[in-house]
Amino acid sequence: MPPTHSAPRCLDLIDGEGSRYWGVNDVGGCMPVISGYMGAFLCDPDSSNSKCSSPLGAEEPKKDLMPPFEYQMDAISANWPVQLAAYTSYVKYQVEWVMGSTGYIRWMIEDVVIFEIPAESVENVPQDDANSNPKKIMLEEPMYIIFNVALSTSWGTTPPNPGSPCRGDGSNAQTNAICDGFPMYMKIDYIRVYQDLSSTSTMAIGCDPSTHPTKQWIEDHIEEYETEDNKVIEVHGGANCRDDRDCTVSTSHILTGKCNSKGRCSCGSSGAWGGPRCTIPLADTANGEGFGPPVILSSLIGVAIVVLLGFVVFKILGQRSRKAMVGAGITGPAVLSKIEMDDIPRSNGGLSASEEKMV
């Protein structure tokens, strides 16, 4: 998609089919305001590299505010001014990530496509005569997604009288109206991840797939994911929910959790499932950490299965044994032995003398 409001912007149908065109108004006549390439050089405050925006002078002392770093940022940016509804109600923001050479990363607002990076633009990069620009592969997973709820003057928003009382001297009606709206809150109702389960999908299912082991990496580098003020804690339930379907594994036929009367997920007392929505299998430790159901529960289920299988095998072998005896002409006297001789009629069709003695 070409940048900004440029004339050669894409006016094609989205994905080449359907009735919707690129652009916010679905007819290809409204494009992102800014979509530029950013190639900033980032470094720590103590770096004296000339590429830094504010390199440390030779005579200036180091502050040691953070570990040293220097790297070239390679980023693409797209911005769109949201409508008034974003300030009065919830608005749905979406990112669709499709891997592979025919994939793309697509940003949407309320199902309307705002911006897209196709895999082709990453893999088939422009080249000079020496082909010095290395080819890349389509990104397979995001390293992180930032849900930015902060306000910054970088985006053109400045609070009234920063560093002073909000209303100043109280003579500006517009400033007073803005300050009357404080405190303001930017809330996130939910964050949901949908994964493609179709037969043609190339997506790895789950948050810790074998191809991209995530849990072990985090545990081995836990210092990078927590601070002294924000320690990693185990969470069992507590997520907002509307019904039980919000608190269980989506592909399971059993409920791993329930939505209580307060609209919060509850994982129950079994200790088998945890996480905000009761979708993480837990182990048998005292506080329920780790993976897998409790050992006691697994053992009881295992014993029950073994007993059931043994009973089924016993019944099958018994039936086969009885059939074999009947086929060989061997019958037991169990029924005849309970019959009194006086109850057997004396007739030509009755038992012979030898049969009577056998009874």
Image: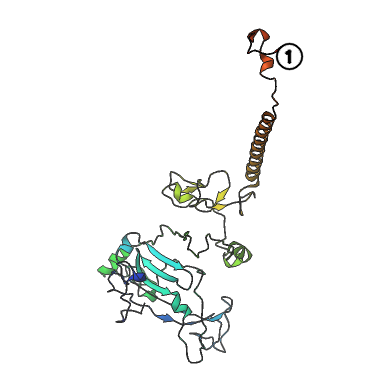
Where does the C terminus fall, quadrant-wise? top right
Q: Where is residue 38 in the image (x, y as percent from the top left)?
A: 44, 81
Q: Where is residue 82 in the image (x, y as percent from the top left)?
A: 32, 68
Most foreground residue, 261 or 121 = 121
Q: In the figure, 156 relative to 335: above or below?
A: below
Where does the N terminus fall, quadrant-wise? bottom left
Q: In the figure, 72 relative to 356: above or below?
A: below
Q: Residue at x 45, y 51 (%)?
A: 246
Q: In the figure, 280 relative to 37: above or below?
A: above
Q: Position of residue 131 (x, y in %)?
A: 51, 88
Residue 16 appears in the figure: yes
Q: How is the model colour-coded?
A: rainbow
Q: Name the residue under label 1.
A: 354
Specify few, some or many for label 1: CA neighbours under 10 Å numbering under 14, 14-19, or 20 or more.
few
Q: Which residue is drawn at 65% across and 36% down?
A: 316
Q: Residue furthest front?
A: 348
Q: Where is residue 214 in the image (x, y as percent from the top left)?
A: 58, 64
Q: Which residue is drawn at 51% across and 81% down?
A: 135
Residue 344 quadrant: top right
Most foreground residue, 244 or 252 = 252
Most foreground residue, 37 or 312 = 312
Numbered disc 1: secondary structure: helix
Q: In the figure, 126 relative to 273: above or below?
A: below
Residue 159 appears in the figure: no
Amino acid type of the residue tagged 1 in the rendering: Ser
Residue 221 quadrant: bottom right
Q: How many marks?
A: 1
